[in-house]
Amino acid sequence: MLFNSLDFAIFLPIVFILYWFVANKNLKLQNFLIVAASYLFYGWWDWRFLSLILFSSMVDYIVGIGLLKQENPTRRKILLWISILVNLGFLGFFKYYNFFLENFEHAFSFFGKELNTNSLTIILPVGISFYTFQTLSYSIDVYRKKLTPTKDFIAFSAFVSFFPQLVAGPIERATHLLPQFYKKRTFAYSKAVDGMRQILWGLFKKIVIADNCAQFANLIFDNSELYSGSTLMLGAIFFAFQIYGDFSGYSDIAIGTSRLFGFDLMQNFNFPYFSRDIAEFWRRWHISLSTWFRDYLYIPLGGSKGGIWMKIRNTFIIFLVSGFWHGANWTFIAWGALNAIYFLPLLITNNNRNHLGIVAQGKALPTFRECLMMITTFGMTILAWIFFRAENIGHAASIFAKVFSKSIFTIPYFKDGTLALPTLILVTLFVLVEWIGRHGHYAIANISSNWPKVYRYGIYYTILILIFWFGGKEQQFIYFQF
Amino acid sequence: MKKFILRVTLFLSPVLLAFTATELLFSTDKGDLLKIGYIADLVDYDRKSIFQKEFSRKKFFTNFSELDFSKRQKFKTMVIGDSFSEQGNFGFTNYLAESNAGPLLYLDRNLHDNPLQALVGILNGDLLDSIHIDFIVVQSVERLIGARTEINQNTTITIDSLTKLKESLKSFVPKSSNTVDKLFSDRILKFVTLNVGFNFDDNAFYSETYIVKTKDRLFSVDRNNLLFFFDDIRTIEENPTLEIAENLNSQLNAVSAKLLEKGIKLIVLISPDKFRIYYDEIIEKEKYPKPQFFEIFNGLPKNYEFVKSDVLLKQAIKTKKDIYFYDDTHWSPFAAKLIAEELERVIEGSN
């Protein structure tokens, strides 16, 4: 069920009431209710894939127990590889089977050989890219002895299937989330209120910003042959806000919902469009995934410790794999490669950690230089998003050809373009609110906490009215397809 | 905990109330004017009982999508139209098919989006060489005439292109308002604001449906109300009527001449907007622009047959209720039958 649906609006309060009034008696009951609710949540999409998540949980639970008992390094490695192969095997099959088959066929036909293969109609289980990485983090951390494996299967299942973040993250580390299932949660009023506020903001980002921008992004990208370079760039800007509103909105709802149940999830987006360079962007965008790749792929490969060629190799590997994680299409790999190209000069010149703080911290406005840097970085990410959104490499290439032509200097135009004006105004106001709130975990976290009640509730109701006014555009969460 | 639940419940109570009211009173399976205007269904307009006999009629016409091209087909009449001709078994198409104007071939509405353009395309194509037809009735609703006269004279519609389109549409599932989430949509906010707003303004300031008071009870409901679509008056205000009428007429004359070369007679049916038919019954009609299209179009020289549907239906509403559906932009089976009878008279007169 989607977060922005009647089903979830009914599901959540029921689970909340049961959790705090019935299951609050003891820890096991609380965790069991989380598992039951999470399996119901996941099964709502497609009950057939419950067996997959259950099997994945069982494999990693048993691997964990095995690693606890096993000291022999070879056998420990075998256990780890069992977990890796099972998890990545499922991911590889469901997500990449047809991609590899098609490319295999193309490669053979390039050499004049025709292969007779049968592609399969495979339904991608929702959230598989997220929960497989989450369980892998458990196996790897247990292997590295950073985490004591759990004998409590219910707690472990709750960690794997925790419904707020199951289908689109944040990808939690076992070291961060699993211990929260070992202690009985107690209700904290301020935490719950903050959770509700974050849910409200997440719904605003998804329904008002993302879904409205999606209409125009889709219109422009799906008919790209009709439009000028400037209109295509406008489409890319719409897409930039669509994907940000969609994905960070989902994360906000996930984090806010978790807080209602007494859990803390990691921050997944930290105002990435205010980044002053690409390195900062990648410290602020989809933080849970980029840190996962850093800790479980980049550092084991040697990280930045080797010579310059090793740095280049490892950087490319990370970005390409990250791109490929998003989907079985060369466009995602191209998107990753372009980001690697953006990142490398900073890494090589040791300028990848220049901007660790908040831009214009404590000030109302950025300096001219900061503004220029943010606009440049934003422009670079928009160009990369073109690959992300395009249907295939040919489509992306045709868009780039127009973007880098004289038509970029024309005034953007598309039929009924004036209908986009309210959305553009909303996006502008949204950016302003995000700018003002950039010191908090989410934009409105601190804005209203010291204000009189009437102003606070005025803001909340304004956001609520906008959510219902702009609702009904029916756009799927983008990251559900991953 | 209790404080939290209480505060959240109080905070969300307006949403809960609005949602409940919408769930109870907003209908998506009644007339289109209720749906697009977000109007509360408080009036007991039971069309199933009013038109019980008409809704249970059998079908007498053939859809294009049912044709078997392995044998040469012969029809007396072909109808190409929009939703006013697509009323299934209770539409004028079916009444006409049952009369002496049958057998009748109907070009499925989902195979085109402009009846006038479809007619030109078919004229340029091969359909009329494969199927024998004596009369073609082309129908369009009045408010869309302006947009539909922008015709590409070079378009060609063939049996092959229609068949391919028909096949591709088999797997197409149209979006319906029922797939919109019931909570997270603009429905509940618009429902509340518009239904309050109707107490102060004929279209609640921004609804796409107008509700006005009439002199008499014109429908089988217990109030003197008329509902109509905002486009009925918008097109009067925005479109240059004389230019549209003349442009349409000259194109129809040209098409008629080409059809006559093939031995086919053209009959043009323009379905009047609901607002036009009931205009004189509106108490405050001075607030609204006076319809002019038919007044101009009726007087233009034509080499095709033309059904004066506006005259026919304006006469009918004086003696019969529910000539149009109360809660819908479309005419009812009562009007459809009158239109079919008039078409039959025209066809028989032309024989």
Image: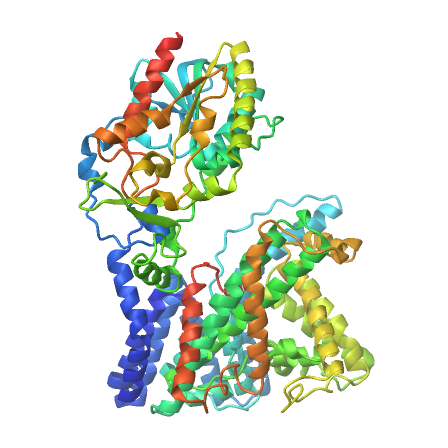
Compared with A225, B301 (above or below) is above
Q: Residue at point 60% right, 60% down?
A: A328
Placement of A7 over or under A276, stated as above or below: above
Task: Give the quarter of the figure containing the N terminus of chain A.
Answer: bottom left
Q: Nearer the viewer, residue B81 or B215?
A: B215
Q: Nearer the viewer, residue A231 or A329?
A: A231
In this rendered view, identify the residue nearer to me: B54 or B303. B303
Q: Is residue B90 left or right of residue A283?
A: left
| Residue at screen point 46% across, 39% down | B236
Q: Position of residue B44 (x, y in %)?
A: 19, 47
Image location (x, y in percent) of residue A379: 71, 69
Which of these two is toward me, B138 or A299? B138
Q: In the figure, is residue B70 to the left or right of B6?
A: right
Please identify the quarter of the rendering in which residue A387 is found. bottom right
Give the residue displayed 66% in from the left and 64% down from the top.
A385
Left or right of residue A364, residue A423 in this image: left
Residue A298, horizontal then vertical, whole percent? 68, 80
